């Protein structure tokens, strides 16, 4: 089983169109176009899985650099996704860099109208 990366797809390309492009070169196990999880719009790349390695190699060499939807396709063997480092906390807790979150005090830091624990409550905003 060989997974093939297909990049620089037109945003309107469908999985059926991609399948039709690869079918002359052999059997296809699965076709998927990657979409943005927030908008559902295509991200401009996808993957084609072919069970036969020789057929996959011939498809890669034939389709790489060809044009589809007015765009030159970038086709090659898919590499495994690299593990990403865990993201640092968004505010504070990270001593390795600047740009931390200043909770209170200092010039302009913190909320000046914080009346928690006091008898007088803050007024409504004037807008």
Image: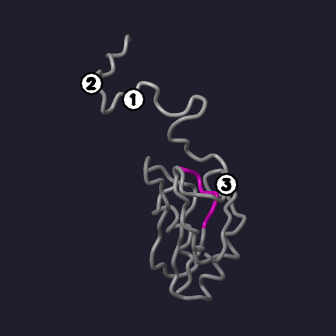
Q: Residues within 10 Å of mark 3 (few under 14, many from 20)?
A: few
Alpha carbon separation for disc pair 2 and 3: 40 Å
Viewer-side residue, 55 vs 100: 100
Q: Secondary structure at mark 1?
A: loop
The residue lying at 54 percent from left, 52 percent from top is: 92
Alpha carbon separation for disc pair 1 and 2: 12 Å
Provide the residue designation for mark 1.
Answer: 114
Kindly check if marks 1 and 2 are in contact, taking CB atoms under 8 A apart as contact.
no
Image coordinates of residue 9 in percent, x first then y, are 60, 57
Image coordinates of residue 118 in percent, x first then y, are 30, 28
Q: Nearer the viewer, mark 1 or mark 2?
A: 2
Q: Nearer the viewer, mark 1 or mark 3?
A: 1
Compared to residue 100, the image places residue 31 above or below, namely below
Mark number, residue 28: none
Viewer-side residue, 61 vs 99: 99
Q: Residue furthest left?
A: 119
Alpha carbon separation for disc pair 1 and 3: 29 Å
Compared to residue 16, the image places residue 26 above or below, namely below
Q: Earlier in the sequence, mark 1 or mark 2?
A: 1
The residue lying at 49 percent from left, 81 percent from top is: 27
Image coordinates of residue 3 in percent, x first then y, are 55, 78
The residue lying at 65 percent from left, 50 percent from top is: 70
Q: Nearer the viewer, mark 2 or mark 3?
A: 2
- Residue 50 on the magenta segment: no
Q: Secondary structure at mark 2?
A: loop
The residue lying at 54 percent from left, 70 percent from top is: 47
Q: Residues within 10 Å of mark 1 (few under 14, many from 20)?
A: few
Q: Residues within 10 Å of mark 2 (few under 14, many from 20)?
A: few
**Which range is magenta?**
6-11
Viewer-side residue, 16 vs 46: 46
Provide the residue designation for mark 3.
Answer: 97
Kindly check if marks 1 and 3 are in contact, taking CB atoms under 8 A apart as contact.
no
């Amino acid at each position: 089983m060989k997974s093939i990366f297909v990049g620089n797809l037109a945003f309107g390309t469908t999985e059926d169109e991609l399948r039709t492009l690869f079918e002359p070169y052999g059997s296809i196990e699965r076709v998927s176009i990657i979409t943005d999880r927030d908008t559902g719009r295509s991200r401009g790349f996808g993957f084609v899985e072919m069970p036969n390695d020789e057929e996959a190699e011939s498809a890669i060499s034939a389709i790489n650099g060809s044009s589809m939807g007015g765009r030159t396709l970038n086709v090659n063997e898919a590499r495994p996704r690299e593990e990403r480092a865990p993201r640092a906390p968004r505010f504070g807790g990270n001593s390795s860099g600047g740009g931390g979150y200043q909770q209170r005090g200092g010039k302009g830091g913190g909320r000046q109208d914080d009346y928690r624990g006091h008898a007088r409550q803050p007024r409504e905003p004037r807008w």
